[in-house]
Image (spheres, rainbow, N blue to C red):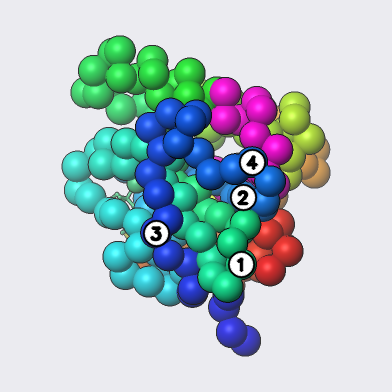
Amino acid sequence: MANPLARAQYMLAAHNTGQLPPDGGFEVAFAGRSNAGKSSALNAICQQNALARVSKTPGRTQQLVFFDIPPTTDRFLVDLPGYGYAKVPKDLQAHWQAFIDKYFRTREALKGLVVVMDIRHPLKDYDKQMLGYAVSRGLPAHAILTKADKLGRGAQGNALLAVRKEMQAEYRDAVSVQLFSGESKQGVDEARAVIGGWLEL
Ligand SMILES: Nc1nc2c(ncn2[C@@H]2O[C@H](COP(=O)(O)OP(=O)(O)OP(=O)(O)O)[C@@H](O)[C@H]2O)c(=O)[nH]1
Ligand SMILES: [Mg+2]
């Protein structure tokens, strides 16, 4: 099956609301703690090595980075700055927080939220905050437990069950969850199906 997301290409990086593309299309945003593996997940899902920038240094992605999906002109994937990175200057952190908050509260084009979490450190406060945002807006959210390659099969299954249970208790069926690895590509088809569905691709 052809993967329409493989056509994704860099479009723009927005530092403020004025730089966002017109708010009329379909967008799926990738959120998660700094260094969780958001950019790597995006690359694996889009079958590209260097679409989103990956770095060993946390805090690499510092804007809302938009990727469009030709031949459409109104479908976007959005790589968000990682949250929870202490070394970013306080005023810059406050700027991102305000920008992202506004984006989440008001963006009509936003059709779904992917929250990328390191399988070894899932459901931290900010993750729950993002999931809560989505659910309170009536947006579907999908949690990706990435770096699954760091755990054995048994531990992966346990982590998945524990996260699913906690999310069920908090969000009912508004949030789904899956195992993933940007390294081994485990779970990429499942993630593509969810995202492709939201983008109506
Ligand atoms: N083993 C393993 N390492 C991964 C995986 N995904 C990402 N990494 C590594 O984790 C580090 C961070 O990955 P990124 O994809 O840049 O993470 P990010 O969430 O985009 O980071 P920021 O943009 O800084 O918030 C890099 O060293 C990646 O190589 C994975 O599935 N398995
Ligand atoms: Mg990144």
Highlighted range, magenta: 102-121
Is 172 left or right of 4, judged from the image as shown? right
- Residue at figure coordinates x 34%, y 20% from the top left: 93
How dense is the environment of label 3, judged by Cα within 10 Å: few (below 14), some, or many (20 and up)? some
Between marks 2 and 1 in the image, the one whose residue lies nearer the viewer: 1
Q: Earlier in the sequence, mark 2 or mark 1?
A: 2
Q: SS at mark 4?
A: loop
On whether ligand 2 comes within 8 Å of the CB at mark 2, the answer is no
Residue on which the image places disc 1: 72
As measured in the structure, the alpha-carbon distance from the residue carrying label 3 to the one carrying label 2 is 14 Å
**Callout 1 amino acid:** Thr
Residue on which the image places disc 3: 10
- Residue 121 location in percent, x, y? 43, 39
**Callout 4 amino acid:** Asp
Task: Locate the N terminus by quadrant.
Answer: bottom right
As measured in the structure, the alpha-carbon distance from the residue carrying label 1 to the one carrying label 4 is 15 Å
- Residue at figure coordinates x 43%, y 28% from the top left: 16
Residue 132 versus residue 29 in the image, above or below: above
